[in-house]
Amino acid sequence: MRRLLRASHVSLLAVALCLLAGCSRSLRENYQRDKAAGHVYQRTLSDLWPEVKAHLKKEGYSWKEMPGHYVLETEWRDAGGGTLGPTSSSRFLIEGHMLPNGGSILRVMRGNRVSQAIGGGNVEQRIAQGGSARAQEEQAVARANANTTGVLPTQQTYARDLELELELLRRIEPDAAGRLARQAALEYP
């Protein structure tokens, strides 16, 4: 009985350590994102901007830039969805700002949009059936009702993307990102 009790205590301890390790990792990641959000680059925007564009290009994004400013907006990129469910896509707005003390900051906003097609599947199914006189009549009715298909109103949300800001920090200033990782490990072992 003692052996069983002891084994259960060891098992509970192992589970608790695994949960704490998972929590610590999450806390370390949050710490790094939060600190990256306030990071001031000690370089000019003209030095940083090519790195920003190189990172986006590596990730497969295309974008439009505002001439004469350090502002770019990526094209919408499909994030998935299917014929029955909603489709979603995202884009980024990245702005670079010079600070009065000579430092630079990068701010990233992520836009997400979700839309849902309605009615199309039923019409397409009816038209595809063909054949008998009854089916042809149904096709005519389906075509007449085809104007009822469409898309529900698109929902869009925008929020600051600290994950991409941290990725940019890791690319542009890997030493500073490494210091944040070490600080996070000390803070949340």
Image (tube, rainbow, N blue to C red):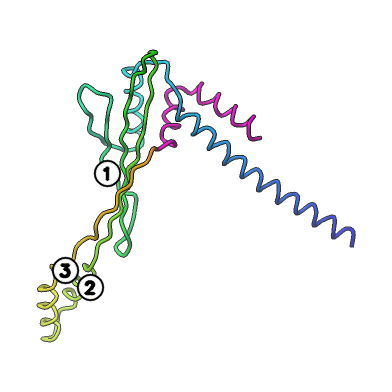
Q: Which residue is mark 3?
A: 148
The residue at 20%/24% (across/down) is: 67
In percent of width and height, residue 88 lies at 32, 52
Residue 68 occupies which quadrant of the picture? top left
**Residue 24 screen position, x and y as percent:** 62, 40
Q: Earlier in the sequence, mark 3 or mark 2?
A: 2
Specify the label residue 122 is tagged with: 2
In depth, the one of 186 and 11 nearer the eye is: 186
Quadrant of the drawing holding the N terminus: bottom right
**Foreground residue among 85 and 105:** 105
Horizontal relation, residue 71 to residue 159: left or right: left
User: Residue 28 vs residue 3: left or right?
Assistant: left
Of the image marks 2 and 1, the number of the one nearer the N terminus: 1
- Report which residue position mark 1 lands on: 76
Q: Residues within 10 Å of mark 2 (few under 14, many from 20)?
A: few
Q: Which residues are magenta?
A: 161-189
Dot 1: few (<14), some (14–19), or many (≥20) neighbours within 10 Å?
A: some
Percent of width and height locating residue 102: 38, 13
Amino acid bearing label 2: Asn
